[in-house]
Each structure stands twice: as structure tokens, then as C-alpha cells.
Amino acid sequence: MAKFITGKKLTDELCSIIKDAKKQLLIVSPYIQLDDYFKNELFNRLKGNSSLHILIAFGKNQHNPLRSIKMEDLNYFKEFPNISIVYIPNLHAKYYANEDRGLITSVNLYDYSFDNNVEFGVVSEASLFRSSDIDAQAWNKTMKILDRNYAVYIRRPNFKKKILFGKDYMGSDTQLDLTEELVNGKLTTKVNVFEFMPENYINDDNYSDEVLTRDEYQAQKKVVNHKKQKKLSATNLGKIKGKSFNEVILTMQKQGYILDKNTITNKGASQGLAYKENKNGAKWIVYPESLAKIL
């Protein structure tokens, strides 16, 4: 059931959506500016939940995005273990949702808005399957808009499955970081936020407690360059060097980048391999164009 709210009820509802999120938190706000309350009382409580995927969309000010979000706040969000940040140049809508409910509103995630503006909102109960008609429409429309815009930062958790059940959190990896291009007004690489798996699993064979050498660490820092590149299917990658699909798959297996044509290893993910999925649910692996050199 949808309910109109304003004033303190609106403020309390938005804060509750953030605070109560366990599995997913969607924040769509053209302008984002966090005060101490937002950080200390709300978001800091979420940092320890690596299973919570936070998806943030902000926008406007294409030539100076830092007018929409402070660098301090951008860097703050980059510390979370499971987060996606998307830039939408023409964004004006505001929408906040977790796995239980959604809020369509006029208010930005901006301390000034809460303290000085008259704001309205409509909150509706939902579920993991978005059972509320209004919230389902808002959620689905938002997903379509995100699909067409610019992912600028992706960080995903790594887990190791326990023998019987459950999983252990083994740290997070930054899989995409285009924030430098964003703040310089040179964001030309359009990366789809849905190309990235929600979480990664490792096993004892490809996980090690060994400390990296300085050279290994420096090499690892270059991984993000693979994420910025154009990604191609195995068939299209093979065309660059006149190789067949099967030849590409065999080469990638020999390199340890994939287990088979449908499964990426951690080593492959570190080289920029990713999954792509169409609207019908078909999924395949895409490869950075630079990997054509090993064919």
C-alpha cells in the first residue's frame, strides 16, 4: 500500500530505508552531500555487511560532477565492500529503496534539503520480488535507466564457501574505477553496471595468504585498465587475429582465465573478463580487447 508522507515522517522514512537495508540498497539522487549524521548514524552501520549491495545513482553537472557529489563523499562510498556507483547526466528523479520498501520523493540525499526545503514523498511496501505495483514500476524503470548509463565505480566482495553451508568474507576487489575521468569531465567510457557479478567465490586453489611483493602489487594496480577497455565476445575477439571461437576458448583456458566457456576464474576476473547478459537471460563471457595479443 502506498502512503503520502512529508516533513519529519519523510525524513524518518528515508533514514529507515537506509538503516534497515540488509540485502540491497538503491539510492537515486541527483545531488548527494552527506553530513555527520548520514555517515555516523546510518551508513557506517552498513560497512560491515559485505552481502549488502549498495547501488548509488547521481547526476547533472556533466562538466563539473563534483557540484553533484563532493569528492569526500565519493571517496567515502568507495570504502564500502559491495557497491556500485552510476552517473546519469540528465537525472532529476529521486528514489530510495531496500528489499522491503521504496520511496519516490522530491528530496535529494543532501543535508540542506532536509533542513530547509518543503519535500513530499510516497512510500510503498515491497519485497525482494517488488510486490507493490507502484514500487515495482519505479524499481523496474530505474533498472532500465541504469542499464543505459555510466558505471563509474564497482567494488565486489569475495567469499569462500564453507564445507557445510554459509560463506566467509575474504575481502573485496575494486573491479572498476573511472572516478578520475568523471571528475575531470572526460567520462566517455560507457560501462554497464550489470556486467559485473554481484559477488565472487574463491577456493583454496586460487586463494593465498601470501603477501604480495612490491612488483606484484604495482602490477595489480594496473588491473583497472582492463576494466576501461572495450570488451568483446570470444567470437569477435577471435576475428581480430583470425582465430575461431574454440581457439579463443582454448587459449583462455591455458592462461587460466576461464574454466570453460561459461566460467571465469579469479585470475580471469583480475584481467578484466566479465559476464554479459541479455534481456532473455542468456549469459556469456566478454574479454578486454587487449587480450587479442595473446591469441
Image: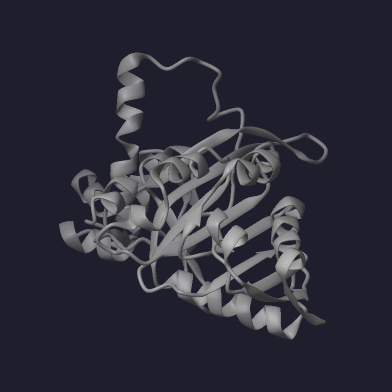
Compared across the picture, whether 2 is left or right of 75 comes to right
Q: What colour scheme governs how the chains and residues are painted in the rendered image of this protein?
A: one colour
Answer with left or right where residue 109 lies relative to residue 72: right
Tell me which residue sits at (27%, 53%) in the image: 229
Q: Is residue 192 visible?
A: no
Residue in front for this viewpoint, 169 or 121: 121
Q: Is residue 196 above or below residue 142?
A: above
State whether residue 81 appears in this view.
yes
Identity of the residue drawn at 29% across and 35% down = 222
Expressed as whole percent of the image width and height from the top left, the position of residue 289 reads 24, 54
Residue 124 percent coordinates (x, y): 76, 76
Q: Nearer the viewer, residue 121 or 295?
A: 121
Residue 125 lies, in percent from the top left, at 79, 73
Q: In which quarter of the view is residue 217 placed?
A: top left
Q: Position of residue 109 (x, y in %)?
A: 56, 59
Farthest residue, direction front: 116
Nearer to us in this view, 202 or 51: 51
Residue at image coords 24%, 61%? 63
Figure disc tally: 0
Comparing 271 with 47, the one in front is 47
Q: Quadrant of the N terminus?
A: bottom right
Residue 285: image quadrant is bottom left
Residue occupying image coordinates x 61% and y 42%: 39
232 sits left or right of 98 in the view:
left
